[in-house]
Structure formats: C-alpha cells, structure tokens
Amino acid sequence: MSIAQDANQLLPGTERNGSIQRAFLLLNALASQPDGASVATLSTETSLPRSTVVRLLASLADAGAVARPDQNRKWILGPTISRLTHTALPEPNLGDRCRPLLEEVTAKLKETSLAAVPIGPMSARVICEIEGPRMVGVRSSWAETTITDPSAGFVRMLLAEMPAKTVTTAVEQLQITQHTHATKATPGLLLAEVEKIKRDGFSLVVDELEVGLSGVAVPVRNNGIMIAMLSTYLPTTRLTSTFIDQACTALNFAADQLGTH
C-alpha cells in the first residue's frame, strides 16, 4: 500500500488511480527544485522510470501544471499550480499577516524568525523571514525557498502530523543526508525526534543542518489542522534552556494570533 493510500481514509475500499499519485509525486519533486529540474533529475528523485516521467510531464504540461521555459531542459511548476496554491492557502494574505507578528518575535528574541506553509507531505515553503539584529547571527536567507530536508524542523513537524503507520513508512523511504556529526541520519533516530515533537509540541534542531546552527519551531493551527509553522534560528552558542522556553512562548503567542483568524 502506498503512503497516499494509507494516509487517505476517505472512501475505503475504493480503488485509487496510480497515475494521479505518481503525478503528485512528480509535482512534489518539482516543488523542491525552485530553479527547475531535468527529466533525469526527476526520475532519480521520484524513483520513477524516465519514460513514465516524460509521459507524466507531457500530460501535466497540457494542463498547465508544469512548464519548460524557453524550451530548455529544466521543468518547473506551471501557472495552474500557482493559481491552485494561492487558492488553497488558508488565507491568501497569510504571509502579510505573518510579517508584523514575526517582527515582534524577532524583537523579543533578538534572533531571525521564519514562517512556512506546507506544500506537500514532507515539504514546506518559507513565506516570510525577519532577520535578527545581532552582528553574529543567521544571515542566509530562506525566504521563498522550499525545504524538504528531514533535518529541518519544518519537515519534522510535517512528519509529526502523519499517522503513526504512515510516518514510519515515509521515514524508512527517505534518503537522509549526514550533514554533521549531530544529524539524526537513521530512520530510528529520526522517528524518535518525530515522537518528541508530538510529545513536546515543538521542534528543536541543534547542529544538524550545519554545525553552530540551531532552531526552534512551533505549529500554527486552525480547528486542529496545521496550516503553517513558525520558527526562530540562531547560533548554537546562544541556545539555552531559558531561550528555548522564551522562544516557545513568543512563537506560540504569534501562532495563536494567526490561527484564530
């Protein structure tokens, strides 16, 4: 049984369309490649045969779901997906509403803060970023980027939203990169982190993406459904238990403001 079938409890017993599932697998892969991806790259990322990828791309292009600008070799998401994504967001102006709240978070914590929305089962897109004021801090911009690495707090929070059986299957199929000595690079270690997020209500990443970089993230919910995530990133040297408590308080306050509208 596929992940999508296992996660979808609607219309039990009804046969699923495998082509649609493969098409969304391809679209998720493209979403993680904002600069575009070749057929060869997409075949590798999805484990689909090259001929299947070509056939799906042709059908998706006819619907405007993918495009190949200037007839180069790289494919990108098309205008149809952009329109659907805009419509599907909990609020079209969510990014605008995040900004003043993140500015308050950054002012309180003196660290960089981010907001992201889910765009796939294990991918999130950063919609707003407020850089911290300290001279030594996070300077790399994630704004408008898609994050798919399971070493990132946002992706782990998405995993924590999955049913237990589904998340186990998903994690076992992941290719986890050992970025640093601290990276949770085995399915067992990653599943333990996911369980910790479920228990604690927030994600904590320390030195896993890059030595010296840490982050705290919390969910934004509407009627129990996670619609976005907020986080703060900072040098590990400034990460203390007191800061974690302060970060969770500030981020959860902002999340409540976003989730109650």
Image: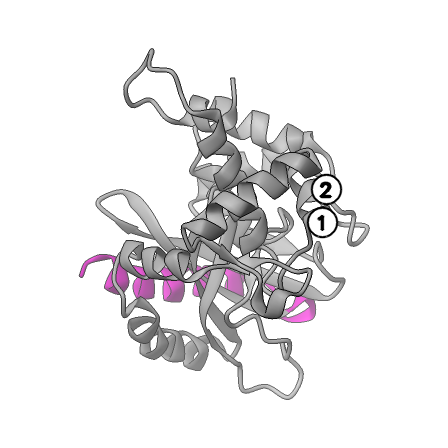
Q: Amino acid at mark 1?
A: Thr
The residue positioned 63% from the left and 71% from the top of the image is 238
Identify residue type, mark 2: Thr
**What type of secondary structure mainly makes up the magenta span?**
helix
Nearer to me, 231 or 238: 231
Inspect the magenta stretch and tell me whether residue 63 lies in it: no
Which residue is nearer to you in this view: 72 or 103?
A: 72
User: Percent x, y for residue 188?
Assistant: 67, 29
Q: Can you say whether 195 is above or below 130 in the image?
A: above
- Using the image, determine if residue 165 lies above or below residue 237: above
Is the residue marked by circle 2 packed among few (<14), some (14-19), or many (20+) residues within 10 Å?
Answer: few
Q: Which residue is mark 1?
A: 41
Q: Residue at x 45, y 78 (%)?
A: 106
Which x, y percent locates residue 107? 42, 82
Residue 133 position within the rendered picture, expressed as x and y whole percent measured from the top left: 54, 87
Q: Is residue 156 visible?
A: no
Helix, strand or loop for disc 1: helix
Q: Does residue 135 appear left or right of residue 81 in this picture? A: right
Magenta span includes 244? yes
Q: Secondary structure at mark 2?
A: helix
Spatial CA span between label 2 and label 1 = 5 Å
Q: Local crowd at mark 1 within 10 Å, few (<14), some, or many (≥20)?
A: some
Q: Which residues are magenta?
A: 235-261
Say which residue label 2 marks. Answer: 44
